[in-house]
Image: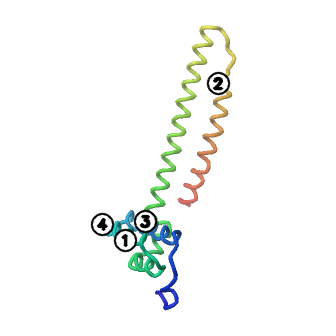
Amino acid sequence: MATATDAGVRAGDRDREKTADLLGQALAQGYLTMPEYEERLQTAFGAHTTAELRALVADLPVARLKSNDPRRQAARRRAARRGMQIHVGAYLAGVALMLAIWLAVAVSTGAWYFWPIWPILGWGIGVVSHVLPVRSTMCRVRG
């Protein structure tokens, strides 16, 4: 609630941007329709006081918008898991390609030095450093 002293407090760009972020989250979570969002956004960037900005989000569940919505968390987990799967798949395809090249060169030239070990290990470190944090996050969520 705005008090008499708050009513005259000027709003800055940061205040307008925070309000715009809240409005965008409200739109994404289905609390606002696109026309409502556009109208409120235009009003937010034209607001002169913080009281005007508060009035734009007064009927929205601001605490829920600021917190991590369970649907949003689930979407982030799915995206992290999918990114991890893509990284591991690309790694395995790269390993298979390097092994095929090594085998073709070794058979044709007789040079059996196993050079693919170095890129496989180097890239593997990157894959492991991607997989472990994602897996540990997934385990904490399930536990």
Mark 3 → mark 2, Cα distance in angstroms: 47 Å
Precedes in sequence: disc 2 or disc 4: 4
Q: What colouring method underlies this structural image? A: rainbow
The answer to whether 43 is drawn above or below residue 81 in the figure is below
Under circle 4, the secondary element is: helix
Query: Which residue sits furthest top?
Result: 109
Q: Quadrant of residue 104?
A: top right
What's the residue type where badge 3 is placed?
Gln
Mark 4 and 1 residues: CB-CB less than 8 Å, in contact? no
Q: Position of residue 17 (x, y in %)?
A: 49, 67
Count of numbered tags: 4
The answer to whether 99 is drawn above or below residue 128 in the figure is above
For image coordinates 36% across by 70% down, the residue present is 31
Mark 2 and 1 residues: CB-CB less than 8 Å, in contact? no
> For mark 3, what is the residue?
25
Precedes in sequence: disc 3 or disc 2: 3
Q: Nearer the viewer, mark 2 or mark 1?
A: 1
> For mark 4, what is the residue?
35
Q: Nearer the viewer, mark 3 or mark 2?
A: 3
> For mark 1, what is the residue?
40
For image coordinates 59% across by 16% down, the residue present is 103
- Left or right of residue 59, residue 76 in this image: right
- Name the one closer to the observer, 13 or 124: 13
What's the residue type where badge 2 is placed?
Pro
Precedes in sequence: disc 2 or disc 1: 1
Mark 3 → mark 4, Cα distance in angstroms: 15 Å
> For mark 2, what is the residue?
116
Under circle 3, the secondary element is: helix
Q: Position of residue 34 (x, y in %)?
A: 32, 64
